[in-house]
Structure formats: C-alpha cells, structure tokens
Image: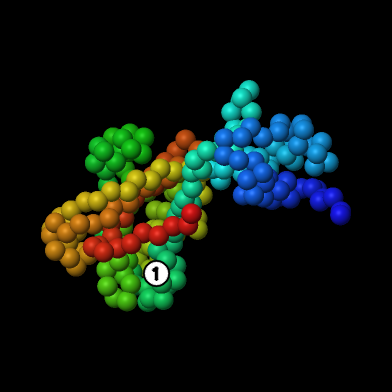
Amino acid sequence: MNKPSFRNWQSVQTEVLRRIHAREWEPGDLIPNESDLALEFGCARTTVNRALRAVADSGLLDRRRKAGTRVAEQPVAKATLAIAVIRNEIEERGQYYGYRLITRREAIPPLAVSDAMKSPQNHTLLHVRALHLADDTPYAFEDRWINPKVVPEGLAESYEIVSANEWLLKHAPYTHGEIAFSATSATSEEAEILCCNENSALLAIDRLTWDGSSTVTKVRLLFGPRHQLRTIL
C-alpha cells in the first residue's frame, strides 16, 4: 500500500480531519505535536502549522500555547457572514429587484452616530436613505452614514440608480467591521416606508465597517415582518 503524500497544507488538513471524524483522535485527546506530525507526514513543520490553524479556525481543534493542541470536546460551528449586495440577494431569490432613493444629504449626524464612527461631533457626513424592493414589495430600508474623509468619491455619487450598499462594496475597501442583530418596533415613518403596521416587529441589522483605524460607513438595515435571515454553517 502506498504511503499518502502530504505535499501541501491542504492535504495535511484533510488527513487531520479524517482522523478526527474517524475518532482516531477522540474529543479531548491531545494530538501529536507539530514536529512529530511533520516527521510522520514527511513535510515541513510550517505546513503542519498552517493545516492545524485551519482546522482550529473551523472549531474542531483547541490550540493553547504551551499546552498543546486537543480535539475540541464541544466543537463550535462558525457561521460565515458576508456583506451582501442586496440587489444580488433579491435576484438570487428569483425576484425582481427595485430601488428607490428616499433622501441624500450632507449633515451633522446624531451624537450616537458620530460616537460610533469615532467622528468629531461637528464633522459633516453623507446621509443616504433608500428602499430596496423585491417584486415591487418593500424588502429593506437602508439608513446609512458615509464618512467622506475616507470615501471622498462618494460625494460625487447621486445614489439615485445604484444604491450606496452596492456602490460602497465596489469602490470602498474595508478591513474589518462590527455587526449587531436586533428586533425593533416600526415607527410611524418606518411603517409607511416598509408598508406595514406601526409597531410591527422588524429585523434590524446595524453594521459598522472600518478601513484600518478609520470608519467607512455606518448603516442600519430594517427588514419587514416575516423576513428570514439565512447564512451558511
């Protein structure tokens, strides 16, 4: 029988996963150290390290400095969330996408917004509010603040045809962000925009994205009653 070839970190990762799923390494077991695995697999220790990091990122290994690497006793499934272009999201559902700009203006934001964006209180930001529709029915209300010092080109955009959501994802790179999910009750204005009853339960997604130490944008997306959020585990 030929000995398996481990020429890259992906092949090592595959073997590590096989041993975990076959219970050759059981939950809680301390697995061999990187040097021993590199010797067994006939590859560089850095290759083993890269593979173990990938498996640990998936939640199946628990790596602790000076304590070794163990098979996780209670693996944690990690959901992957990507910032979606709402137009694509609607069209992938097989629905017709529509868009309507509600307001676009430069303004000094509320204190809560400037604090979240680490912006001086007298700093003018670009405020864009718009409605995304699916088959001519309100789908999401987008209430967004954009930092023109980070995205100066954004001031030249009207956002009448292309949404700020789509334009920013194409033209404004970001390094990291924060996201929060909550339930909220529709105000009279939100109810009118989303064509639902006042005080209806809405799904709110608040997102803040950064480029290094500077905030790119802060957005609140409101989805109407019965909206379902789906992701991949």
Where is residue 36? Give x, y as percent.
77, 33
Where is residue 84? Give x, y as percent.
44, 59
217 with respect to 80 (left or right): left
Q: Can residue 100 be seen in this view?
A: no
Q: Badge 1, how many Cα within 10 Å: few under 14, some, many 20+?
A: some
Instruction: Please report the residue visible at 25 percent of the width from the left and 37 percent of the height from the top.
Output: 111
189 with respect to 62 (left or right): left
Where is residue 172? Give x, y as percent.
48, 51
Residue 43 in which image quadrant = top right
Q: Is mark 1 on a helix, strand or loop?
A: helix
Residue 41 in which image quadrant = top right
Q: Is residue 91 visible?
A: yes
Residue carrying label 1: 90
Instruction: Please report the residue visible at 64 percent of the width from the left and 49 percent of the height from the top.
Output: 22
Instruction: Please report the residue visible at 80 percent of the width from the left and 48 percent of the height from the top.
Output: 7
121 or 222: nearer the eye?
Answer: 222
- Amino acid type shown at disc 1: Ile
Instruction: Please report the residue visible at 27 percent of the width from the left and 73 percent of the height from the top.
Output: 137
Q: In this view, does 45 lie above or below 190?
A: above
